[in-house]
Image (cartoon, rainbow, N blue to C red):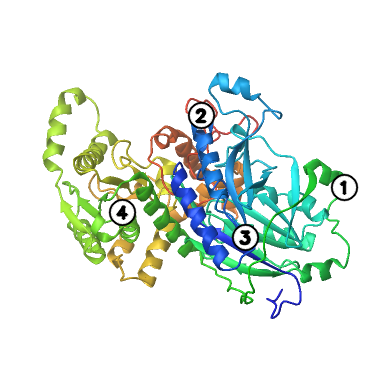
Amino acid sequence: MPRTPTNNAGPILRIALAQVNTTVGDLAGNARIVKERVAEAKRLGADIVAFPELTLPGYPPEDLLLSPDFIAGNEAALRDVAAHVYGIVAVVGFAERANGAMGVPQAAAAASGLPGVLHNSAAVLAGGRVAHVYRKVLLPNYGVFDEKRYFTPGNECPVFDINGVKVGFNVCEDIWFPVGPSDVQCAAGAEAIITINGSPYEMGKEDVRAGLVQAVARRNKAFAAYVNMVGGQDELVFDGGSILTGPDGALVALGPMFEEALLVYDLDISLVRRARNGTLPASATANDLRRVGKSSHHSLPHMRPAARPILAAPEVCSMGRVESVYRALVLGTKDYFRKTGFKKALIGMSGGVDSTLVCAVAADALGAENVTGVAMPSRFSSENSFLDAAEVCRRLGVKLWTIPIEPAHRAFEGMLAEAYTGAAPNVAEENVQARIRGNVLMSLSNKFGWLVLTTGNKSEMATGYATLYGDMAGGYAVIKDVPKMLVYELCHWRNRVGPGSPVPQSVIDKAPTAELKPNQTDQDSLPPYAVLDRVLEMYVEQRMPIEAIVAAEAARADEHADEVTVRRVAKMVERAEYKRRQAAPGVKITGLAFGRDRRMPLASRWQPWEKQAGG
């Protein structure tokens, strides 16, 4: 692994990676964050400070990019930042209006009210001005990404001379392919690659990112740095975890996750030059490189800071899977409140494991004093459920209000009696209770201006095991992408690490139940959650065909789903799509979350759960 040098015998490039938490649309606030970090990096003697993708407009700005005023405002913010950059090079993400040569002419765009051709760009700032602009070449258009809706790709891969060191900058998706802009830049002499990113959190994604960065470094014999943003934005959470690798691909440093940081590193460029031994890397054919884009060379005005001590190499930070999910939930919830202006949360407390986890996350994100639990017992609620809800709130320091729903339940039965005459009882009678509870919570929200947090998990959202306008009513769905079995893991983890042990063992041990009728449990309607979660992962996240799931389950020696169960689960998933369209946004933590990741038609006669002809 490359070592930090102990003297200045070789060329040293000091880079700073600014993991910052910006807010979509807060152009002045985002610019202020950049200026503060630029000044801090300069004080620390950095040659370069790099910020994440689309830092100035915030990420992802979505259809704000279609507003000419918004684009003009982000460009004005860029000019403001550039005027403060002297004695250091700053790389800042922004949305750039092109001159019309690559798409719709600006005159036609102006006539239509649109901003015209846009690039997802990295501005290279030096000497008080915008010295150059790198335009993202590879635009993602899958999952949560929709960049081809807004941006036109660039076709230039510039290399910059900074104090005698050749550096290439690029943006996020540009390093996700075996041959990309970094390879063009290194073939043209770049000795360090710095990629600015807006890469949202998913379980296990940090290992994928590290592998990509290491591959860029290894095949090009260059330093590779990756700076990622931090913070929650609607359903997405950005986890930081910025990366630096040496020219042999070894991991040199991994920044902290879920927190802002300015990570400063010294790159010993002599390691690159010795590894290359006078020859440029040839990791791809000339034709492949030309297909990506053309190279160009630029020298940047920059004064070397005064004599500076060599920095010690930072430690590599790491985090376990369950801890990272919990921290993502906390950060996503905290930032959703902060960025939307809400101060306090309301949670319907059933005494079950889901509402308990949501309450713990909310207390950790907002402070217990800003969370209110509401117990709403019915004629079917057990005393133990109420006692468990009260104990959870006591342990977390959250106040609990008790509002029995029996008076409203009796009133609804009376109101509906004539209309229901002659009809056999079904789930409608059960769901009235859930809808009363939803009305109670939303009435309190309306009265006090507090945001209701829903408590449904991914297993329930997937199968439609939730009541529309009932327990689905609310403003933010903290665990909507958390499968039921992971809910239990998170509760155990939170008890283990503290503070305190907020989840009573009685909550963990009890059979999950909606308590909408006597002696009800979830397993009356659903397969065991361990089996259900496995089938859902294969069907939803891995998009496996029904037959392949049936075969995979049949091969298991432990408890598994038979063919009838697999087909029933698939049918439940597809039939519940209309419910999910009306669900509150919530934190994305898996590779495929309901919502922007999975867009299915509501009116469709495609029925994958049915056996196909010849099958």
Q: Is residue 501 left or right of residue 576?
A: left
Residue at numbered disc 3: 87
Q: Secondary structure at mark 4?
A: helix
Residue 73 lies, in percent from the top left, at 50, 37
| Mark number, residue 601 | 2
User: Is the residue marked by circle 4 packed among few (<14), some (14-19), or many (20+) residues within 10 Å?
Assistant: many
Tag 4 residue: 355
Where does the image place residue 145, in percent across and percent down from the top left?
A: 57, 41
Q: How many marks?
A: 4
- Among the two numbered marks 3 and 1 on one chain, the one whose residue lies closer to the N terminus: 3
Amino acid type at circle 4 is: Ser
Dot placed on the residue nearer the N-terminal end, 1 or 4: 1
Is residue 403 visible in the rendered image? The answer is: yes
Which labelled disc corresponds to residue 286?
Answer: 1
What label sits on residue 363 in the rendered view? Answer: none
Residues under numbered marks 4 and 3 in contact, where contact means CB atoms less than 8 Å apart: no
